[in-house]
Image (cartoon, rainbow, N blue to C red):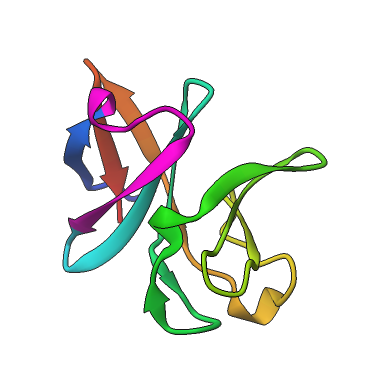
Amino acid sequence: MQAKNWKPVCSVDDIVPNTGVCALVEDRQVAIFYIEDDVFAIDNVDPNVRASVLSRGLVGSLGERIVVASPIYKHHFDLRSGECLEAPENSVAAYPVKVEDRTVLVAV
């Protein structure tokens, strides 16, 4: 099993609860969300429109799933898996994320 390469990206205090921010991690835009004391990380680029917008989407839930709605066509992305619910072929990567001493770490 390969050890994860954790990268510190910000303080959890830098993220307004129930919103997202974008961070550049290993030359990749990652959308990081802080929702109900959980932190999630997915690609920031919406493949449906090839725009870097997911960190600015509206977060909510669809059934048991915590999702972000892309600001452009409102496609929903599951924050745990990166699955695009309306167009699964356009899903994004989801990354392991953890918080240590209030620092958000992402493994890409």
Relative depth, front residue between 5 and 55: 55
- Name the residue at the front extreme: 72
User: Is residue 71 toward the left or the right of residue 106 in the image?
Assistant: right
- Name the residue at the top extreme: 101
Relative depth, front residue between 100 and 54: 54
Q: Determine if residue 3 is in view.
A: no
Give the residues drawn in magenta, as a range: 12-24
Residue placed at 74% from the left, 72% from the top? 86
- Residue 87 magenta-drawn? no
Q: Quadrant of the C terminus?
A: bottom left
User: Is residue 86 toward the left or the right of residue 25 in the image?
Assistant: right
Q: Position of residue 73 (x, y in %)?
A: 61, 74
Q: Determine if residue 101 is in view.
A: yes
Relative depth, front residue between 8 and 56: 56
Asked if residue 19 is positioned above or below residue 26 in the image, the reply reads above
Q: Where is residue 72 in the image (x, y as percent from the top left)?
A: 53, 73
Asked if residue 101 is positioned above or below residue 2 in the image, the reply reads above
Residue placed at 48% from the left, 20% from the top? 37
Residue placed at 60% from the left, 79% from the top? 90
Asked if residue 104 is positioned above or below residue 6 in the image, the reply reads above
Residue placed at 26% from the left, 37% from the top? 105
Relative depth, front residue between 57 and 5: 57
Q: Please state the total of marks drawn on the protein image.
A: 0
